[in-house]
Image (spheres, rainbow, N blue to C red):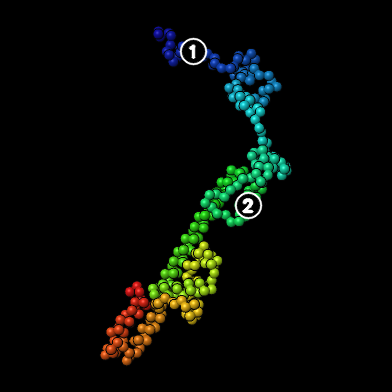
Amino acid sequence: MSDGDGTLLTNPAPVDDPPAPAGDGVADPAGSAGGVKETGWLDGVDEEYRGSIAHFKDPNSLAKSYVHAQKMVGADKVVVPGKHATEDDWKSFYQKAGMPGDIKDYSLEAPEGVELEDGELSEFKEILYKNNVMPEAAAQILKHYGAQKSAAMDRVAQSAQLDATEKLDALKNEWGEQGYTRNLHKAALVLREFGSPDLDQVLDSTGFGNSPELIRLLANIGQAMREDTFKGEELQGGMTRDEALSKHQTMLGDIDGPLMNGNHPNHQAALKEAEELMKIAYPEA
């Protein structure tokens, strides 16, 4: 390049106009500012149909929608009732969706292993049917309810058993081992004398036959009654802790008695008896 031609900065080479971008545009004969007029794929559609399909971005989207619509032709259709629908409208809707038309056809059974009270299943069935709960959903609801009820009953039974065990242990500690055996026998005799087979069944089925309060009550009744009241049945041997302590104190208070008098011929026997009384009073020692 000669000096007369200038430099690249002072005499740059002319730049050719870039080619028009490819697309759906055509030259704007009116010479608009952009020079190109957007036509899109809807340009080939009659004006009266454009508004209905303008939301489709391309012909492929329109085709997919058409195919899907064709598949729905002839299929059962369920229209959801509006806000002004009547009770009959809703009933008709749910029946079309699968709800039985009569409660007699509404099948609902108690879950396996779950015992419901008399009439409880019928009440559930009536409530669920009245509220248009589908049979499949109703079965799942009842199954969940049954599981929760069984778990709650187990917790109550375990708690009652634990409470009874603790109270029975307290009775054994209060009465001593032998006294507990004798008083339990007293209570059983009172129940046998004045109870009935039906009462025995109730006590067994409810577990109330292990109630410490009931055992104590019946034992006190038996204690207050003469032993010959029980048709010749002899009370089993043994004494309570209080009885053992009381007798031991009496032996200690008798200065001239065999326990306190070392020269008494029955001194050794009294010592042994006093030791047995202490074992009854304090079996844990």
Disc 2 marks a residue whose amino acid type is Ser
Check the image and report above or below for 247 versus 208.
below
Earlier residue among tags 2 and 1: 1
Front position in the image: 217 or 4: 217
How crowded pointer 2 is (Cα within 10 Å; few <14, some 14-19, many 20+) is rated as few
Residue at the spot 63% in from the left edge and 52% down from the top edge: 122
Q: Measured from the top left, where is residue 77 in percent x and y?
A: 66, 33
Disc 1 marks a residue whose amino acid type is Val
Residue at the spot 41% in from the left edge and 80% down from the top edge: 242
- Residue extending farthest to the bottom is 256
Q: Measured from the top left, where is residue 17 in percent x and y?
A: 52, 13
Q: In this image, 208 relative to 45: left or right?
A: left
- Residue extending farthest to the left is 263
* Labelled pair 2, 1 in contact (Cβ < 8 Å): no
Residue at the spot 63% in from the left edge and 49% down from the top edge: 125
- Secondary structure, mark 1, is loop
Q: In this image, 194 relative to 106: left or right?
A: left
Residue at the spot 56% in from the left edge and 17% down from the top edge: 23
Check the image and report above or below for 87 versus 63.
below
In the rendered image, is residue 220 in sight?
no
**Mark number, residue 15:** 1
The residue under label 2 is: 122
Q: Measured from the top left, where is residue 171 in percent x and y?
A: 43, 72
In the rendered image, is residue 66 in sight?
yes
